[in-house]
Image: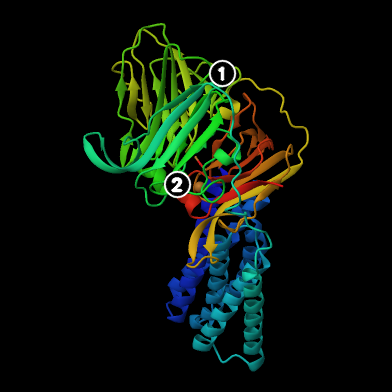
């Protein structure tokens, strides 16, 4: 069982236990004896089974179980101790056990709420609030259903509840000691000098574009989705003038995966102000990284990218030879892009397909009709990539894979989630059952260039209730906090930095650090065994733990976030900052 399914199974058991106790208590109060005994026995079994999933999860890491061990386990123990013996005695008047059964239900429910609303790290505040909730609910139930409690008993329950509530609230709302990221600082200007310069102008505006025969309202660069493909030869200087015609919420250009100087990174509020209608901004940087990249707006990026403000950036070592096509996959108004391309290619011609996922979720790509190699991922060439057949690749949101092959005499087709996007002729192959490539064990390894780390950071990804804004929201969180309350990761120039990224949620989080590529060290404790993987976008699936490393060699303030852009918008955005 994967840790992801353990997280889900544990949640289901917890829900069943809570529901069983509550149902048992309610039916006992109604004197429905057999039903009450049945539900409560079921709840007792579920509660006693839960340590199995908790222990199994603990083996994947403490992050997955902290609040379950520290808060849910004691509450469950109390539930079993209070309700268990009374249930087993099964008194004639079943109504007399209603209060203990409901107490167990409250205990299980509040522990569940701690997991769902608060998560990691387990805090004393959350624990005390949970206890207060149980005490309060039990006290009320007792008044309604129970035998008259003695004055001492009710006063004790009340005192425990009030004390827990007061302390818990105090701890839960105490200000986060971490300082935020300084927004709107002076934007440094690091102009590069050098020629030749490639100049482009991108004008953002609302537009109507045609997708598979349908007119769709979009936001477009130069009236087209995707925007114009920008290409350069390594060493060129790129000078891109961004103009905003009428995008009211502002635009910027972020060079996804391109490790540009911080001032050119295009993150509004951090490296520049958003470009408003009528304004312009000129980006200038040297194209010194070869490979497949893309650009997109970073202003209200969730909406902006989805609506079409993105395009391809390719930097080649020399002018292209053979067939060299970029395939940026996107979903616009529910319709898939790009429109399928079919072009015959002469046998023997080298072909490079530059696959780009510009959506917020993973896509599955399958190349049929030829053996191929994955030459590069996220712009970085792989070492010793071997030939693959009948193998799919899963590309995370924001990620790029370059597939290369020599055109055979027979047709070849590239499928994305089962749909043909590129072909050299008709191919009918079912690719749905193909296994997916694991890049961590593909190609030839080489020694890890880090021997020690100056800084280590752990990012635990989850969901949680965020009460710090104007309106409460169910945020996507990092270490229990949501943007802008997540402490930045502070490094010094030249530090060797290690990130441990833990996903305790039930959603995939495609992680993306700006300004740097990170080397994958391990996943779920197993070291990467294939070619060194220098990535800027990688899927951290539910229950996974990734360790990645990089050299802090590009000073500035850098966004470090989930590239499922609605998640980033809902809090899953942090920053890497240089001292
Ligand atoms: Cu492709 Cu911060 O983004
Ligand atoms: Cu996410």
User: In the image, which disc is placed on residue 385?
Assistant: 1
Query: Residue 224 at x, y = what percent?
Result: 32, 34
Up-down relation of residue 66 to residue 275 (above or below): below
Between 345 and 247, the residue placed more toward the observer is 247
Q: Nearer the viewer, residue 538 or 283?
A: 283
Is 221 rendered above or below residue 300?
above
Mark found first going from the N terminus, 1 or 2? 2
Residue 454 occupies quadrant = top right
Residue drawn at point x = 53 percent, y = 71 percent: 105
Position in image of residue 427 (x %, y %): 31, 18
Q: Is residue 120 left or right of residue 493?
A: left
Q: Residue 321, located in which quarter of the rendered image?
A: top left
Residue at which label 2 appears = 275
Residue 534 relative to residue 564: left or right = right
Nearer the observer, 489 or 543: 489
Residue at mark 1 to residue at mark 2: CA–CA distance: 42 Å
């Amino acid at each position: 069982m994967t840790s992801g399914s353990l997280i889900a199974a544990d949640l289901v058991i917890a829900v069943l236990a809570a529901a069983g106790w509550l149902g048992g208590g309610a039916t006992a109060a109604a004197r429905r004896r057999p039903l009450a005994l049945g539900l409560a026995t079921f709840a007792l079994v579920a509660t006693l089974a839960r340590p199995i999933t908790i222990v199994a999860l603990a083996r994947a890491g403490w992050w997955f179980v902290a609040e379950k061990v520290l808060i849910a386990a004691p509450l469950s123990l109390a539930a079993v101790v209070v309700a268990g013996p009374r249930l087993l005695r099964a008194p004639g008047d079943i109504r007399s056990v209603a209060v203990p059964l409901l107490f167990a239900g409250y205990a299980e429910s509040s522990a569940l709420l701690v997991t769902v609303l608060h998560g990691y790290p387990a805090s004393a505040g959350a624990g005390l609030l949970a206890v207060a909730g149980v005490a309060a609910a039990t006290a009320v139930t007792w008044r309604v259903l129970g035998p008259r409690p003695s004055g001492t008993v009710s006063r004790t329950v009340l005192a425990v509840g009030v004390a827990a509530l007061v302390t818990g609230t105090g701890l839960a709302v105490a200000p986060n000691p971490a300082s935020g990221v300084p927004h709107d600082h002076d934007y440094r200007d690091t102009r590069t000098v050098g020629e030749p310069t490639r100049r482009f102008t991108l004008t953002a505006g609302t537009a109507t574009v045609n997708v598979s025969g349908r007119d769709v309202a979009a936001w477009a660069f130069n009236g087209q989705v995707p925007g114009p493909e920008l290409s350069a030869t390594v060493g060129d200087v790129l000078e891109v003038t961004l103009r905003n015609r009428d995008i009211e919420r502002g635009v910027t250009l972020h060079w996804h995966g391109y490790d540009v100087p911080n001032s050119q990174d295009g993150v509004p509020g951090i490296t520049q102000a958003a470009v408003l209608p009528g304004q312009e901004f000129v980006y200038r940087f040297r194209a010194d990284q070869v490979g497949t990249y893309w650009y997109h707006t970073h202003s209200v990026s969730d909406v902006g990218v989805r609506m079409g403000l993105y395009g391809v950036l390719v930097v080649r070592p020399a002018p292209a030879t053979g067939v060299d096509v970029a395939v940026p996959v996107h979903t616009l108004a529910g319709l898939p892009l790009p429109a399928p391309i079919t072009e015959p290619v002469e046998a023997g011609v080298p072909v490079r397909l530059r696959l780009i996922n510009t959506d917020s979720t993973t896509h599955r790509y399958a190349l049929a009709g030829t053996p191929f190699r994955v030459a590069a991922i996220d712009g970085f060439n792989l070492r010793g990539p071997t030939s693959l057949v009948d193998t799919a690749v899963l590309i995370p949101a924001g990620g790029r894979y370059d597939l290369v092959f020599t055109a055979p005499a027979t047709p070849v087709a590239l499928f994305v989630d089962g749909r043909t996007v590129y072909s050299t002729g008709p191919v009918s192959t079912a690719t749905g059952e193909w296994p997916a490539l694991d890049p961590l064990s593909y190609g030839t390894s080489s020694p890890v260039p880090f021997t020690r780390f100056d800084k280590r950071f752990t990012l635990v990804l989850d969901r949680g209730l965020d009460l710090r804004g104007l309106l409460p929201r169910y945020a996507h969180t990092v270490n229990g906090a949501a943007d802008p309350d997540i402490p930045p990761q502070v490094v010094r120039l030249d530090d060797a930095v290690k990130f441990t990224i833990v996903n305790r949620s039930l959603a995939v989080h495609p992680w993306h650090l700006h300004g740097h590529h990170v080397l994958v060290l391990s996943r779920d404790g197993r070291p990467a065994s294939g070619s060194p993987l220098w990535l800027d976008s990688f899927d951290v699936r539910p229950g996974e733990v990734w360790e990645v490393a990089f050299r802090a060699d590009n000073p500035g303030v850098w966004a470090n976030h989930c590239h499922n852009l609605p998640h980033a918008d809902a809090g899953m955005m942090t920053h890497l900052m240089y001292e």
